[in-house]
Image (cartoon, rainbow, N blue to C red):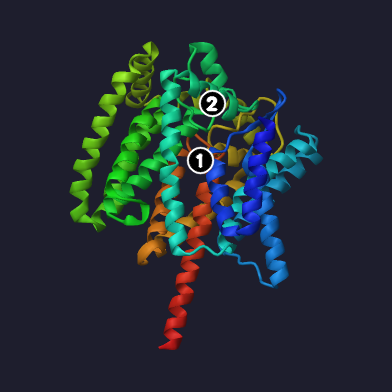
Amino acid sequence: MQVLWFLALAALMGIALLSLRLGMILYLVGALIFPALWLGETAAVRFELIYCLWLFLLLFLRKSVAGLAFRGHSVLGKYVLFLGIISMSAVFALLNGEAEGSLGQIMVSFYGLLRPLIVAFLVLNVSIDEKLASHVSRAFLWLSIPIALLSIGQTLGVDITQQLTLQGYTSPSRSPVFRLLEERGVIIRSTGVFESPVYNAVYWLLVLTTAGFGLLTGSPTFGGKWFLYLVFGLAVVTGITTLTTTFLAGAVLVMATLVLLVGYRYPRHCFRFAIGSAGVAGTFVIVGLLYFTQQATFAGSLGYQVNRILSGTLFYTRYDAQGGILKGTYEAIQHRPVIGWGLTEREGAFVGDSIYISVLYRGGIIGLGVFLWLVYSILKHAWRNRSQGGIPGKICWMLLLWTLLLLATGVGSPSFFILRLQEWYWAFVGLSLSLCSQSYQKKTRHEHAG
């Protein structure tokens, strides 16, 4: 297994050596579906950890040899500032002797935060035209089909999907899959390739948003109508298999956002989209439930999650100051509210369940403020450029919708920094910045020529 894993990685690195553009696409595909490799019982290595640095090295060498300047953007500058604050917070916490964490652990965590910046920077500097951007968008939806089959198989307890999950889509640092198998004998709350039902739910909300936007606008950028309906239906039924309030409540939010924010621009498509999506989703859900209810605990778990939404208690286990899992985190934040703890660890603090709590813990009020400023800049860019014609405008729309969705799901997940999924979001940030820059340059040249 290890030999095959490294041979596949070497082959993909060789392709990137020949074509950096193709290497970038392979990076996104691999980041989403390339299996992790276990190194003993305590560590696992993921494809994107190595391939990201390889692409950056190739880009640096090619730019240096050709004597070309790197392209930057103010949005990426704000991300650099955010990283700087997190790093400074860690240094202060360590110097004061108030936190724990080895240098190796801190560097690994820092690389995790640095990688989204590298991804956006790579896409901004790799020559990606509108045609290739369309292929990237379609690839995101095409990849949802095998992930849907894996997720559905996990909920049904299909042996081959469970074995595939255990061997390729788990790691020692994450326990949901192992806990579900120990408690129920099957991965009844599907985790897909993300090792967590909640992370899988966020992924399916993004797929639902993308397919829904393609159907609502009638744009061929994301694929044909029937393909989009297939993906839309799969997203609904597979999202339900996560058995999370994140998907159940988020799906309603997605549909409302699409109709209210996008529908008014395409009134002729809106009614057709509403009828078509309701019919497809209903058919998929009815057929899916016939199979899922064969699992004795599925209906009970689904009813429990629906009841949490209706009763308004869906955030209790996270945010309750006395009985929630963030009690120790609140105490740590109160101790250092302005600058935070950086990438160090404090006993009793849990920071993996909410992007807002996580950033507040790591960067304090200053870090959270800069992060929200960064997100605001992305939203502002996407909103201003959404009316551009062709693919640049469509990509900006997608960036706008994805950002709003990740802001909402960030209440219960690390959203912008979900492993595997973060590569795609920050790639779309870089893609949007690149396409809009190219469009502006073409317009300027045309005006000068005229």
Please indicate, yes or no, whether residue 233 appears anywhere in the rendered image: yes
Residue 204 at x, y = what percent? 41, 37
User: Which mark sits nearer the N-terminus, 1 or 2?
Assistant: 2
Whether pointer 1 and pointer 2 mark residues with C-beta atoms closer than 8 Å, the reply is no
Which mark is on residue 165? 2
* Pointer 1 residue: 415
Residue 33 at x, y = what percent? 53, 38
> What residue is at 43 percent from the left and 62 percent from the top?
131
| Vertical comparison of 339 with 245: above or below | below
Tell me the crowding category of disc 2: few under 14, some 14 to 19, or many 20 or more residues within 10 angstroms, Cα based: many
* Residue 395 lies in quadrant: bottom left
Residue 164 at x, y = what percent? 54, 26
Along the viewing direction, whichever of 101 and 206 lies nearer the viewer: 206
Mark 1 vs mark 2, CA separation in Å: 22 Å
Which of pointers 1 and 2 indicates the residue nearer the eye? 2
Which element is circle 1 on? helix
